[in-house]
Amino acid sequence: MRIKVRQALTAEQPLAGITIAGWVRTRRDAKGFSFVEVNDGSGFKNLQIVVDHTVPGAEALADTLTGASVLCQGDLMASPAKGQKWELKATSFQLLGRADETFPLQKKGHTVEFLRTIPHLRARTNRLGSMMRVRSRMAMAVHQFFQQRGFAYVHTPIITASDCEGAGELFRVTTLDPLAPAKLPDGKVDWSADFFARQSYLTVSGQLEGETLACALGDIYTFGPTFRAENSQTSRHASEFWMIEPEMAFCDLAGDMQCAEDLVKTLVKSALEQCSEELEFFNAYVDKTLLQRLQLVVERPFARVSYTDAVEILLKSGRAFTYPVVWGENLQSEHERFLTEEHFKSPVTVHDYPRAAKPFYMRQNEDGRTVAAMDVLVPGVGEIVGGSQREERLDRLVAAMTAQGLDLEAYRWYTDLRRYGTVPHAGFGLGFERLLMFVTGEGNIRDVLAYPRTPGHA
Ligand code: 4AD
Ligand code: MG
């Protein structure tokens, strides 16, 4: 029976007659036998296989280089070697797939920049393999968090005709011939001849559709891919990323902030519990302060500060920022990082942002100049969550939409929520890749996605 390396390494007792399959990390030859270190992707650690040169198939050993795939039968026994409890004593050896010396992942360490040039192979390294396992378990932890709280998992469309964030950073979806699109008599493109008979795009956020479902099901969340055609060449922006977007009916900004804090804390806690081997690896090789920082995140409440007070703190800091701090402007990444890394030295939720800097859907505060928005900022990454209470008052919403130049008829379905049984509601978006950067200490979003898409790279 085939068992995974991870199961073998955590066995309670010796196991006779098992099968192990995997990829060779190293082979060392001794007189009469060889040590073959095998990893099958089930976990961080390799299993050592001791292959006596007399077992069936052993003649292929000389051809078994780093990167080859092998299948071995044998008995799992206590290992006399230091640092490992078990090893497999092979009774047969089979070389499944050869790899020659050109296999790019030889034993020596590789830079992340080099690994990015071989995305199809890099998951076989400790660094990317660990990331992919953390990613998988974190995805499950997201579902657990919401399912335990009675949220419905909904699937909002990926192709949409609306621009939720109003930033115009949309990828167009079209079947028109780019060289000869159908045209109107005035020479403009005739979008009614396009596939969806109107202009359509890849979604930047499932929020607007999410709101309609929350105003039917109560509490919902989405967890899906989102796309942004923003030309940001930074270590924290991807053109295709995954977002978790809860939306809660009968909820205000305070409830929204609490939910975001609980979610981030719960996810960090489950990473510490369920990915301990991987996190120890990241702590040793990527960021030496990682485990200590994550422990503090779990233990202490997040700091909270209004945008207006945050601006005061930044102005009083005496820092020479590249971008000036001006009330009314969005906080720049250097400002966010100062707040979370140096001033509060903890995650911080900034709330009540200036209205002019934010999209139409955010609830207007009574001061006439701010909206009930909030962002969660974390050390090392900056913004990880963005959300708000939504404007549930029809007149205020319509005024904001008109002011931002939206086509009221096209968003009729959205304003209908405010015509029929409107309720206070709130939600947020958590960037899944930003979360993964935070829990692993990985500094570049290109190293938390298997196949990162960024401007100029698909
Ligand atoms: O702050 P954002 O733009 O908010 C929204 O899209 C809201 N509609 C969400 C909501 O209220 N339902 O994006 C939310 C989060 C950010 O805080 C960030 O973590 C992540 O999504 N994000 C990105 N992650 C990677 N690459 C990008 N280009 C990202 N843009 C946003
Ligand atoms: Mg944001």
Image (cartoon, grey):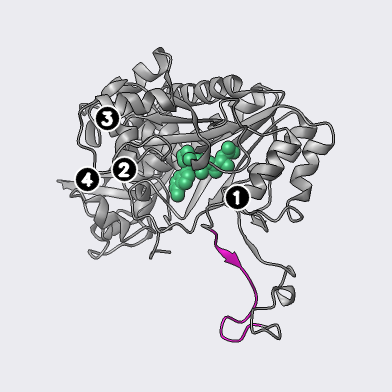
Tag 1: Cα neighbours inside 10 Å, few (<14), some, or many (≥20)?
few
Q: Is residue 180 magenta?
A: yes
Q: CA distance from mark 1 to mark 2?
A: 45 Å
Q: Amino acid at mark 2?
A: Arg
Residue 29 visible in the picture: yes
Instruction: Choose mark 4 or mark 3, whichever is in front.
Output: 3
| Mark 3 / mark 1, whichever is N-terminal | 3
The magenta span reads: 170-181
Which amino acid, by three-letter code, is at mark 4?
A: Phe
Please give the label number shown on residue 266: none
Which image quadrant for residue 40? Answer: top left
The circle on residue 404 is 1
Q: Earlier in the sequence, mark 2 or mark 3?
A: 2
The majority secondary structure of the magenta stretch comes to: loop
In this rendering, would 68 be left or right of 172?
A: left
The image shows a total of numbered marks equal to 4
Magenta stretch holds residue 19: no
> Which circle marks residue 33 in the picture?
4
Mark 4 to mark 2: distance in Å? 30 Å
Q: Quote the CA–CA distance across marks 3 and 1.
A: 46 Å
Question: Mark 2 = which residue?
Answer: 127
Mark 4 residue element: strand
The kind of residue on which mark 1 rests is Gln
Under circle 1, the secondary element is: loop
Quadrant in which the C terminus appears: bottom left
Above or below residue 316? Residue 18 is below
Residue 248 x, y percent position in the rendering:
68, 28
In the foreground, 358 or 73: 358
